[in-house]
Structure formats: C-alpha cells, structure tokens
Amino acid sequence: MIRSDILKDIAPILRDQLVVCNIGLPSQELHMIDDQPTNFYMLGTMGLSSSIGFGLALAQDKKVISIDGDGSVLTNFGTLPTIANNVADNFILLIIDNGSYGSTGDQPTYAGKRTSLAAVARACGCENVVEVPAADTKDALQAAIDGDKMTIIVSKCESGNIKVPVITMDPVVIRDRFMKAVQA
Amino acid sequence: MSINTKIVDDLVANDISFVTTVPCKQLAGVIDEIDTRPGVLHVPSNKEDEGMGLCAGAWMGGKRPAIIMQNTAIGVTINTLATLIQYYRMPLPMLISYRGELREPVACQVEMALHTKALLAQMNIPTYHFHKQSDAQELDMILKYTFMCNKPVAILTDANFWGGYGDQ
Ligand SMILES: [Mg+2]
C-alpha cells in the first residue's frame, strides 16, 4: 500500500474528525479523496502539521488528527518532546511513514533506513506509540479515536504517488471554513 | 508594578490565553510571570517555527496566542511567517527580545540585530521597538491592532528597555 491507499482506507473515519493534513501530496490526495470543511490543508510550511494540530488540540476539546509524514517529522523533531510533555488526550498524530520524501520525488529519508520514528517518539516521552503496517492503519486509528488517550501512530507503507491536482482553494477560505467546523 | 507584570497584564487583558516561548535571559521575568497566571496556557517550544505552528493551531481552536522569543528567531521563521501566519491571515503578537542593540554585551548578537528590522520590513510585518520602559504603554494598543488586522506583529524589546546587563 502507498500513502494514497491509506488515505482512501481511512477517509470514512476522518470525515467526522478535525484533521490537519501535511503539505504537498498528502493534502492534495485527501482533498481529492474526500474534501471536508473539517480538513485543514497545509499549502506550505513543511514540518508543522503536528504542531498546528497539537496547538488546536490544546485549545479546545474536540479530537484532532494530524496527518504527518516521515520527512516532515524529521524536519520538526522538536515537536515530539513538546507533545510528550504537554499531554492532550484529544490529540492523535498519524505519521504515514513511506521512508521517502514523497512530494519531492521519493528521495529516501533516514526513517526508511536506520531511524525508527516510533522509537524516537518513545524516547521523547510519548506514551502511546504504535507502529503498524499500512493495512492496519484504519483499525489503529479507530482504536485511537475510541481510546481517549493521546496516541502516535506510525504507519509503515511503500513509497509512491498518484496523479492529483493541486489545491486551488484560497488559504483564507480553507482556514475560515475549518474554524467554523471547529466551532460547530 | 514591575514591567513583567505590566506586560503580562496587557496580554491577559487582551484575552491572550496561549503563549509559547523560546527563552532569552531578558525575557526570563516575563516567562516567570506568565507561569503565575492560571488563565494562560504556557507551552514552551523547542524552535520558534514549531511555536508558530502551535500558535496557529491554538488560534484556530479559539484561543488568542502569543509567541515570546529572541530576534535571532526571525532568521528561523521567515518561511513560517510567510506561508502559514501571513498566507492564512492569522494574528500573532511576537514579543521579541532584541539582542545586539544598545547595552548588549555579546558581540555576536549584533550580527542578527543588524538584519532584524530589515527582515521584518521586507516581510511587511508591523514592527514596534521598545527602547525605554515607558514605551510599553503602547503594548495594549499594539495587541488590539494585531487582533484587529490578523497579522503577525513584532514588538522588539532591547537591553536598555530591560535595564541592561549589570554595568553595561
Ligand atoms: Mg514520506
């Protein structure tokens, strides 16, 4: 399975949740598969999906799912100690780990080599860290949503991309409809 | 009233309830003061761009945010300011310790000080420079202005504002 297969698989669960989605292809794929006002698409700023989602989770009570990538977590490693030390049980970080920088041409990341993001998250003090094969992502995500405990899911999948259109929605429109969905 | 109390009183009076910090010696008193206020959630961040991500999320979640950091962070956060805070039009007061200005004892700090205002100007970020403690009278207005226009706004506070370092 590649990232877009996982997104197709979990789209029915994501539908009712607040989702902050990583820059580039992940946002474009989610937007194509099931655009929802509850989705916040990152159009820039690589690495901050977990930080934006975590800030949102700390500020209000609804569940928040940040969809991140291995390359993006590597670029913002400081996020993991922050998450670990300010626990928000309405926060789920889903790291889709395809071992490559997918949006830029599938250059390998260190997460696909010797570095385990799950082990790093645990070392940073995160308590509920699960690593699953791609096919089990849907069940792991549902369990995390049902569990009411802050959870980090590392979903290991193959690298590869599908053809998707870019998101042409204005950022202020994305943000405004997302904020209305947060308040609804 | 101490300047730290005055600054944090203004943050609280403007409904700021989420603050992230990357510390600076000059800002230690403000950060301590924030930790005495139960209505303000203080989440230290490890890097200032991470902190701006937290602030963006907190704001979308209904809390008014602020970030407290050194001016060296302008070099770290240009991309985040442009593609997150400005692009999605979000308010972000940035209380900035302006190192490398008058009464600075560490020469290297001058290097980023020289670029700070030029970078902020290049980014079209409204910028205020507190050089003496009476300048802080404007803080309340600056905060209101920030949340009126939904922009990042820089408040530079130099060593002279904080009373300098010992005999410097
Ligand atoms: Mg990847």
Image: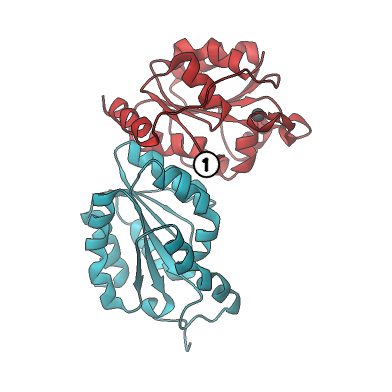
Q: Is residue A80 left or right of residue B120?
A: right
User: Is residue B119 shown above or below A89?
Assistant: below
Viewer-side residue, B122 vs A134 = B122
Mark 1 is surrounded, within 10 Å at the Cα level, by few (under 14), some (14 to 19) or many (20 or more) other residues, namely many
x, y (%) of residue A40? Answer: 42, 29
x, y (%) of residue B149? Answer: 27, 50
Which of the chains is red?
A
Viewer-side residue, B103 vs B37 = B103
Which of the chains is cyan?
B
User: Is residue A64 shown above or below B128?
Assistant: above
Q: Which residue is mark 1?
A: A45
- Ligand 1, what quadrant? top right
User: Is residue B134 among what the camera can see?
Assistant: yes
The residue lying at 54 percent from left, 81 percent from top is B105
Q: Tag 1's secondary structure?
A: loop
x, y (%) of residue A176? Answer: 31, 33
